[in-house]
Image (cartoon, helix red, strand yellow):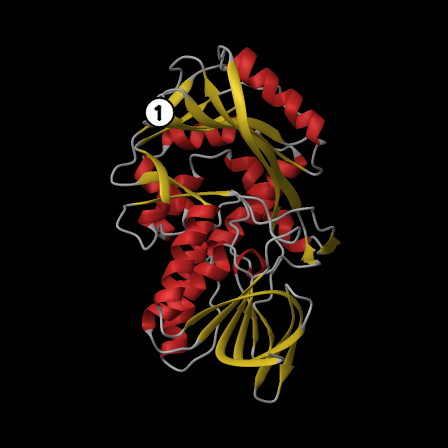
Amino acid sequence: MRDATCDVAIVGGGASGLSLAHHLTATGSHDVTVVEAPDGPLRPPERTWCFWDRGGGDFDEAVSAAWSRLRVHGTGGDAVTVEPSPFRYRMIRSAAFERLVHARLADSPGGRLLRATAGTVCATAGGAEVQCTTAAGRSLTLRARHVFDSRPSRTLPPARTQLLQHFRGWFVRTDAARFDPEVADLMDFRVPQPRHGLAFGYVLPLAPDRALVEYTEFSRTPLTTEAYESALTRYCGDTLELPAYTVESAEQGVIPMTDARFPRRMGPGVFRTGTAGGATRPATGYTFAAVQRQSRAIAAALHEGRARVPPPHGRRALAMDAVLLRALDTGRISGPDFFTDLFRRIPPQRLLRFLDGATSPLEELGIGLRTPVRPMLRTALELPFLSRRPQPVPRTGENSR
């Protein structure tokens, strides 16, 4: 087969591409083809995606763990533990997510999975074309009315500020029960802080004797794998004081944290989604929940006969994130103190809604007054006069937040 056609082509079978495929086929109004790389070096390793919600979502079957309480440790060792009920913090592993959505696509009359390597995407008079190469090495042209490309961008748009959230995590098993499966440590600042940016531990217990333990930095450049391994060894031994443990597997990633403006339309029938379309929250790196909002909105628009990709985050949220990124990058605020105080001073349900961009202007004003007002105000006044500059693309796959 050298040619194929469909209503909607989705390039990339990660969280964004498969989420969009699920929401589109659920409406039953479009013929959808997902172009996903065949097994081999082009497929990314298994990843972890986390988010908070009230339950009852589309992908509950793929959730591998959930936590009812969240904890943040300050640099001095003081812990802030919150219970944001009805929200729970949830983990999905990419392999389970892929199996679930692949099965749903197979059961959908309008769903199709094409295992091929996608090349160029070109706009045409009737929509767009995707040039593909099958696992057998044959060329194939996929023609569609609309193409949604979720692959990471080769270049990043110009930005005033860009930090990187970079990390390495170990799935560890201990010889004794050392973890509380009900409590997720989102940020543990009891680690040595870098000269620029901030660092923290991240612990998601999977059982009393199993957990995902990560070392994460917000800074301008990633570390070497050896440096992450050294930091994780110190964190597990000196901070968590774990007994003998075994590292069963590892994951590593880099997430751009930037105030760049991501274009979501690349041509009459070509669109960008997911991280490539700006779904990653600039100040936190979280993406999965925004991808779901964006995918549902795209599916609703196409069902009504309109092709569009709405912005995944509101203007106020992006403006506040731009201020925070600049304040962190210049060192005007202490990252560990800033995030610890957010959890200490703001009701947890309101804070999580704020991080999802679901708070009102009045609520956001109240949150802003509980942050370092002077340095944040100085940064806000400075931003309009800063130019946007080209940014390097970090070595990254899909993020694990």
Q: Viewed as shown, does residue 120 lie left or right of 8?
A: right
Can the viewer see residue 121?
Answer: no
Quadrant in which the N terminus appears: bottom right
- Give the mark count: 1
Above/below status of 80 relative to 111: above
* Residue kind at label 1, given as amino acid type: Thr
SS class, disc 1: strand
Residue 52 at x, y percent in the picture: 36, 43
Can the viewer see residue 212?
Answer: yes
- The one of 311 and 209 positioned closer to us in this rendering: 209
Above/below status of 352 relative to 119: above
Residue 395 at x, y percent in the picture: 69, 46
Residue drawn at x 64%, y 41% as measured from the top left: 164
Residue drawn at x 53%, y 47% as measured from the top left: 321
Image quadrant assignment for residue 290: bottom left
Image quadrant assignment for residue 109: bottom left
Mark 1 lies on residue? 81
